[in-house]
Image (tube, grey):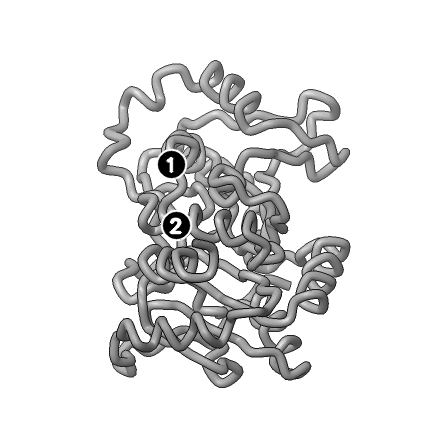
Amino acid sequence: MLHSTWSPSYADRRAPATPADVDAAVELLRGHRVLAITGAGISTDSGIPDYRGPDAVPRSPMTYQQFVADPGFRRHYWARNHVGWHHMRATRPNDGHRALARLEQAGVVSGVITQNVDRLHQAAGARNVVDLHGHYDEVICLDCGRVISRRELDARLTALNPDFLDTLDVADVEVAPDADAVIERTAHFRVASCEACGGVLKPNIVYFGENVPRERVARAYEMVDDATAILTAGTSLAVQSGLRLVRRAARDGKPVVIVNRGVTRGDEHATMRLNAGTSETLTRLAETLAP
């Protein structure tokens, strides 16, 4: 179940990683089959804020239980998502995404497990990607299981709420990593139902309080077992879905390199810990390991 009671203490900020630290990480990973595990921090340079970074605005995402139990919560969520989705689909991969794709193409990185739903790894050219928490561009019916594209739903929501986006200044709306957005006026927003059965529609992403599908977890474990080293980038590992993968690798004696601004829940399992941004650090790794 996607859940976390852990939050980082940024009073315990580590010294920034030096070029020598990055070079040491390069040597640690050299010759290994590296699995990358990424979180929201890798996408901040693409304009998508994270939930737990040192500069993140504190906020609580909607839980699965809230979404399914209360039509008011669903209306509020879909109104915000209708705005956030337009921002999310306009984002582009950054140097960190491109560096991992380059490392994969060179055979250094065996694959990517991402906790993000933004699909930016695929947009950068990565091929072996597990979207652990789903992805923002699909919608699923909770009653019949039918899956449709978010683009298709956008057309329906726009038809139901033709003037809604015109009343907002999207440039001033805060967008979250799950394509949610912080807006206030949602009381009159009209929500679409499943065209097949009239059921409740939900973004095809894993909410807090919801379980990651078993087959996806099994695939993630297979990737961990196949790798000989782990590189985490831009994740605080606050939720178990990512942390348990790092624990498994550390248990098996595999080197774990953590790249993140600020502390993470997995620091005790790290062979090497780099307090650094993902774009510049991953680019340096790619330049050296995949010249």
Quadrant location, the C terminus: bottom left
Left or right placement of residue 92 versus residue 166 in this view: right
Q: Which amino acid does label 2 sit on?
A: Ser
Circle 1 sits on which residue?
91
Query: Toward which corner of the image does residue 169 lie, by quadrant?
Result: top left
* Secondary structure category for the residue under label 1: loop
Circle 2 sits on which residue?
43
> How many labels were placed on the picture?
2
Left or right placement of residue 107 versus residue 11 in this view: right
Residue at x 40% of width, y 15% of height: 162
Quadrant location, the N terminus: bottom right
* Secondary structure category for the residue under label 2: helix
**Is there any visible trace of residue 63 in the rendered image?**
no
Task: Give the number of the disc on residue 127.
Answer: none
Residue 265 lies, with reference to residue 83, above or below; the image says: below
Q: What residue type is labelled 1?
A: Thr
Residue at x 31% of width, y 49% of height: 45
Residue 93 rendering spot, x and y as whole percentages: 40, 41
265 or 175: which is nearer to us? 265
Residue 290 rendering spot, x and y as whole percentages: 47, 55
**Is there any visible trace of residue 167 in the rendered image?**
yes
Badge 2 or badge 1: first in the primary sequence: 2
**Crowding near pointer 1: few (<14 within 10 Å), some, many (20+)?**
some
Left or right placement of residue 218 versus residue 80 in this view: right
* Distance (Cα) linking label 2 and label 1: 9 Å
Residue at x 49% of width, y 69% of height: 237
Q: Do the residues labelled 2 and 1 touch (CB within 8 Å)?
A: yes
* Residue at the farthest front position: 291
Residue at x 61% of width, y 49% of height: 129
Residue 46 rendering spot, x and y as whole percentages: 34, 44
189 or 285: which is nearer to us? 285
**Crowding near pointer 2: few (<14 within 10 Å), some, many (20+)?**
many
